[in-house]
Image (tube, helix red, strand yellow):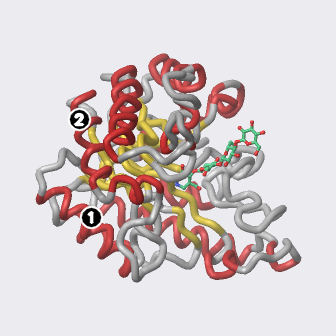
Amino acid sequence: DTIGLKDVYKNYFSIGVAVGKRNLTGEESALIKKHFNSITAENDMKMERMQPQEGQFNRKEADSIISFAEKNNIKVRGHNLCWHEQAPSWFFTGKDGKEVSKAVLLQRLKAHIDAVVGRYKGKIYAWDVVNEAIDDDSTQYLRNSKWFQICGEDFIAKAFEYAHAADPDAKLYYNDYNTERPEKRERVYRLLKSLKDKGVPIDGVGLQAHWSIYEPTEKELVSAIRRYSSLGLKIQFTELDISIYPWEKNKRSKRPDESDAYTAELEARQIAQYKMVFDVFRRYKNVITNVTFWNISDRRTWLDGYPVPGRKNYPLLFDTQLKPKKAYWEVVKF
Ligand code: G3I
């Protein structure tokens, strides 16, 4: 029989999973209770879900996730308070239809964070305060989002200050992807260092870990952990999944075909990648405080159909029948 991932890793770090309300009943909820001691709302705490219109809060789904967690003694990671995606356009627009000023936008950000973090004060142990503020283009530093266009880089520090004021006990994280790629790693490091130097209340960095069977390499992963933790920050792997497709291939928009099958060879590579990353995680348990999977099983993952429409992916430790995969056994055996 399987052993709970959270029990196997109890002397290392908490083990989390991203969920929606639909996962909280039936077979899937049993799996959550058995294996995980931390949960994240995959979508339900994002800006547009929490505050679709100014001053109009929608907390039903988020509340049901919190109460499931409380009932089952599971901690909650909050995701997220400020992001360029899933941020409703009213934030950036005034009554006159024009773009708002920096002062107005920061005031709206503060009101949002006060309301959301305030409501769950003491119930959410860590928040992704700012998500994905670094540009994808390696020659750029910060992403040219609405937040950046209107506020410059100040919105980042402000978001952390507002969150800290709303719940001084919550751990505050900056969260991003591709953070092991050397060029992006250095840009993320630059941001984190500037926040630390300014005395901004930041506790750690969330490395999303949307990985593939080809990347990161062990060397890249270790370098990233060392680099970020050298700033005195904690590390959480916040959205782990290991795609069976290389990201290079993803870039081409293609239809699913024969070559997209989940072959034994791809599975073997995936097992090896899961083994490698968990070996590294255990080695760095002093700085790693949580590892969260982005969904429960291959039954449904955000990678289904992304970025190739219609293409299935198999990135997690449990299969479409919710049975443990070989990779699961590799992760619990050490
Ligand atoms: O719930 C609605 C449904 O009512 C509607 O009919 C349907 C029509 O498209 O959309 C549904 O919402 C979708 C939602 O997922 C729930 O399935 C949104 O369109 C879709 O955009 C949304 O995608 C989410 C994505 O963030 C948004 O950018 C993914 O589920 C979620 O896994 C993904 O998570 C992000 C992290 O927050 C940040 N890091 C990257 C990660 C993967 O992209």
Quarter of the figure with residue 127: top left
Circles 2 and 1, Cβ within 8 Å, touching? The answer is no
Q: Position of residue 329 (x, y in %)?
A: 56, 56
**Tag 1 residue:** 191
* Crowd tier of the residue under label 2, counting other residues whose Cα lies within 10 Å: few below 14, some 14–19, many 20 or above: many
- Comparing 306 with 324, the one in front is 306
Type of amino acid under label 1: Leu
- Comparing 208 with 31, the one in front is 208
Helix, strand or loop for disc 1: helix
Q: Position of residue 32 (x, y in %)?
A: 57, 34
- At x 33%, y 34%, the residue is 110
Task: Report the Cα–Cα distance between label 2 and label 1.
Answer: 18 Å
- At x 58%, y 74%, the residue is 213
Q: Position of residue 144 (x, y in %)?
A: 45, 65
Label annotation for residue 164 = 2
Q: Is residue 250 above or below residue 277?
A: below
Furthest residue to the right?
Answer: 258
Q: Position of residue 153 (x, y in %)?
A: 30, 59
Type of amino acid under label 2: His
- At x 35%, y 72%, the residue is 141
Mark 1 or mark 2, which is nearer the start of the sequence? 2
- At x 19%, y 63%, the residue is 194
Q: Is residue 132 above or below residue 17?
A: below
Helix, strand or loop for disc 2: helix
Task: Pick the quarter of the image with the N terminus.
Answer: top right
Task: Pick the quarter of the image with the C terminus.
Answer: bottom left
The reply, left or right, for residue 198 in relation to residue 46 is left
Q: Is residue 119 above or below residue 318?
A: above
